[in-house]
Image (cartoon, grey):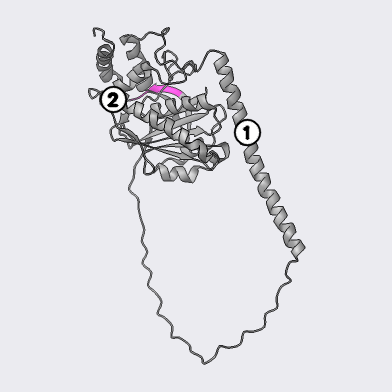
Amino acid sequence: MIRSAISGCSLLASGALVLLTACAKDPTPEAVTSDRPDPRPAIEQPNQPTQAELRKARAERNRAANAVQTSASAASQTQSDYYGAMQRRLIAQGKLRRDRVPQDAPITAESLTRDFIAIALRDEYSRSGDGLVSQARTAPLRRWEQPVRVQLEFGASTEIAARPAWRSEVAGFANRLSSATRHPVTMTADRGNFPVLILSEDERRAIGPRLAELVPGIPASDIAILADLPPAISCTVFAYSKGNASEYAHAVAIIRAELPPLLRTSCIHEEIAQGMGLANDSPAARPSIFNDDEEFALLTRHDELLLQILYDRRLRPGMTEAQAAPIVRQIASELLGEAA
């Protein structure tokens, strides 16, 4: 599995408890005046290092810093080579297709309904203690009710010259999601509720404090999972609701900075789309990016229809499969011009 989407994890919101301690100031002592300052006592000066010793210490510090930087660069280069080879292998196998409406994969109202139930009304992962296990289970319908504000952030390893291309791609996809869902999805420079972080291997491992700032109340166990992603997972998304609600309040996606262009775009499409509420993958979904077989790299018309169904006002967050299924079938028939 190249990409992993983990969503539907409930975030319990609690009021912040602030303790304020009042400290009385000590009375200001009376000033002691003197016509002239007392002479300072003689202090024996320690032996000062020689210039040669200073140069040696500086050289050792520089060597240590260079060793750390070289190690970090080597780790990142290893990741780049790994994902580059992965992309080439998948393309050679006929995967990572980019056609939006493939002619060899027709869509029917029945298949669209089936795929919606499998993807939107299932969770790909279940909690087990402080971790997550790959175990699909039924789940209520979840989506955003408030506007989605995507906040793109980069680690220092992403070159300044490369960032406009990332921003343009994410902004274009946000517009596409907004058109498909008829729900506001916009870019923002700060105070976003859906941060998308572009991080190298070393940057991701140190991202914990920033994650806690970006996603208020994010569980420490989730921070640990995100900081310690195995190489097989090139990107992922976590989405959170408040308490037992089914409306998303926050989401966060992490995409590896070392990815080659097509895998990068594929991660942008899948993780942000899954963060909209299509939480699961299905081996039967086709043509779709929500399938672990990696046949399609980019959002297809099939996937746009799933998003359109998800944000149809006839459906409501919290609906069960039994409640949603007949409505989904009706909407799918309307979208494809079939009789319900």
Comparing 115 with 288, the one in front is 288
Badge 1 element: helix
Please indicate, yes or no, whether residue 129 appears anywhere in the rendered image: no
- Residue 30 % position (x, y): 43, 86
- In front: label 2 or label 1: 1
Badge 2 element: loop
Residue 80 relative to residue 18: left or right: right
Q: Quadrant of residue 326?
A: top left
Q: Is residue 138 magenta?
A: yes
- Residue 10 % position (x, y): 37, 34
- Residue 196 % position (x, y): 44, 36
Instruction: Identify the disc placed on residue 311.
Output: 2
Residue 130 against residue 316 in the figure, above or below: below
Amino acid at circle 1: Gln
**Magenta residues (range):** 135-139
- Residue 88 % position (x, y): 58, 20
Instruction: Identify the disc placed on residue 299.
Output: none
Please give the residue where the numbered disc 1 appears in the rendered image. 77
Residue at x 43% of width, y 7% of height = 104
Residue at x 62% of width, y 28% of height = 81
From the image, give the main secondary structure of the stretch colored magenta: strand
Residue 252 relative to residue 142: left or right: right
Rounded to the nearest angstrom, the CA distance separating label 2 from label 1 is 41 Å
